[in-house]
Image: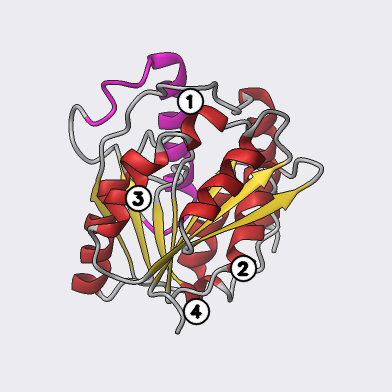
Amino acid sequence: MNPALTVVVACLDEEGNLRRYPAELFPALDSLAVPYEIILVDDGSTDGTAAEAEALASLRPQIRVVRLSPNRGLGGALRAGFAQARGEWVATLDADLTFRPERLADLLAAAKAENADLVAGSPYLRPGDMDAVPWPRRLPSLLLNAFYRRLFSMRLSAYTPVLRLYRASRLRELPLVSEGFEINAEIAALAARRLWRVCEVPVPLGARSCGVSKLSRGREFARHLRLVARLLTS
């Protein structure tokens, strides 16, 4: 029997954060009371991420590990995870747990209540939900999301965050090509074109407690520009 939920986690040099999963991720998923699987995508890590992922898989039959080499970027890693997903619903979650996994329950509840195809977790809906994020990281995110809201008809507050829940049958329809962090905006834009049922739930965004961010602002800004050019001409 296929699981009801697949959780895809892209991991690049996240050895320390994977050690947190038995205490923080697994209890949150167990509490959902639905059959689930976790796909850990090791995106060409150079630390002990692969070994930690395999150790977790040995403890939990719900975990599968996908290993990529060389590194393909967040978009490439998520697409590799999507290709392996067996659940009716597919969730994406940051490897560093800056969006808390307990919030997946809110996304599932919203999907059921709204009969949604995409539920986005957004830190922009309530005052204070981004207080833990420093302004050098917060400002570019705010500007990018405002930019996408002006371009596309779907009035999401959150085009770029990873925390999402997708109806798997709809996700498989999308011709995704993004390799970097812009994949989340690509999915949202394509969903708008296809008139998906979309909703958002407020979710706090925390600060990293382990490891370092893999986001390169200059590189990702260039990728967003290429994505917009491709979307506007296709």
Q: Which residue is mark 4?
A: 169
Q: Vertically, is 51 above or below 86? A: above
Q: CA distance from mark 3 to mark 4?
A: 25 Å
Mark 3 and 4 residues: CB-CB less than 8 Å, in contact? Answer: no
**Residue 12 appears in view:** no
The disc labelled 1 sits on which kind of residue? Pro
Residue depicted at x 60% and y 48%: 54
The disc labelled 3 sits on which kind of residue? Phe
**Label of residue 140 in the image:** 1
Q: CA distance from mark 2 to mark 1?
A: 32 Å
Residue depicted at x 32% and y 33%: 205
Q: Vertically, is 58 above or below 35? A: above
Q: Locate the N terminus and report the quarter of the image it occupies.
A: bottom left
Q: Secondary structure at mark 2?
A: helix
Q: CA distance from mark 1 to mark 3?
A: 32 Å
Q: Which residue is mark 3?
A: 26
Q: Position of residue 10 (x, y in %)?
A: 57, 46
Q: Vertically, is 210 above or below 92? A: above
Q: Which residue is mark 2?
A: 84
